[in-house]
Image (spheres, rainbow, N blue to C red):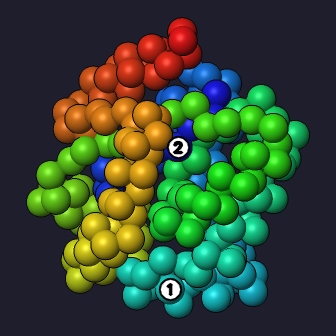
Amino acid sequence: MRLILMGPPGAGKGTQARFVAEHYNVPAISTGDIFRANVGQGTPLGLEAKAYMDAGEYVPDEITNSMVRNRIAEDDAQPGFLLDGYPRTLAQVEELDAMIADTGHALDAVVVLSVDQDVLVARLLARAQTEGRADDTEDVIRRRQVVYAEQTAPLIDVYRSRGLLLEVDGLGEVTEVTQRVFDVLDTVAQS
């Protein structure tokens, strides 16, 4: 399976990605995790990405695209993958289309987790405290929500028009949301 998991920051994409990837035996590829690892290691890419992340902005497409292209070309991603945090812009959709076409495969589904914005802000503030994430201040969190609405939300219509979009209510206990995701994806897997 080749999947995209979408939703605003704080919707639970990272949590659900782990369960979905394990269920379908594909790697979960999170651009956020890759960026944070590079920042933590102080790599040149990490230092460049950190300035954007600290301001609540997206890392430029050129950096992100080449990172994703390299990752989905790795052996463990040949049978499929789950992308979490990519694509985020219409230009990245076009780039991803080309990447997948180069492999001779197609995207199977795009799952969008829907969650109320006030719930998202509360979740991210709580996560910032428990995980010590300096990049999760309320101002940055709210800015990320605005950037998501402006740049990423339009992708939902693109994937809906392609018949790939599956919308899932992201509110509730983790296990409830996971079951909803499995239910919609199992219909894709069976077709």
**Mark 2–mark 1 CB contact (< 8 Å):** no
Above or below, comparing residue 52 to residue 154 in the picture: below
x and y, in percent, of residue 17 in the image: 50, 39
Query: How packed is label 1: few (under 14 Cα within 10 Å), some, or many (20 or more)?
Result: few
Q: Which residue is mark 2?
A: 4
Label 1's element? helix
Residue sitting at x 50%, y 86%: 52
Q: Is residue 113 visible?
A: yes
Q: Which label is found at residue 6?
A: none
Q: Earlier in the sequence, mark 2 or mark 1?
A: 2
Camera sees residue 76 = no
Find numbered disc 2 in the image and state the secondary structure of the residue it sits on. strand
Q: Nearer the viewer, mark 2 or mark 1?
A: 2
Q: Residue at x 68, y 78 (%)?
A: 62
Residue under numbered circle 1:
52
Place residue 103 in its image quadrant.
top right
**Residue drawn at x 28%, y 79% as measured from the top left:** 143
Q: What residue is rendered at 40% in x and 43% in y? A: 161
Q: Is residue 170 left or right of residue 70?
A: left
- Total labels: the figure holds 2
Q: Nearer the viewer, residue 41 or 75?
A: 75
- Tell me the amino acid under the disc marked 1: Tyr
Q: Nearer the viewer, residue 34 or 132?
A: 34
What amino acid type is highlighted by mark number 2? Ile
The residues bearing labels 2 and 1 have C-alpha atoms spaced at a distance of 23 Å
Image height of 164 relative to 122, above or below? above
Left or right of residue 91: residue 53: left
Residue sitting at the far right: 75
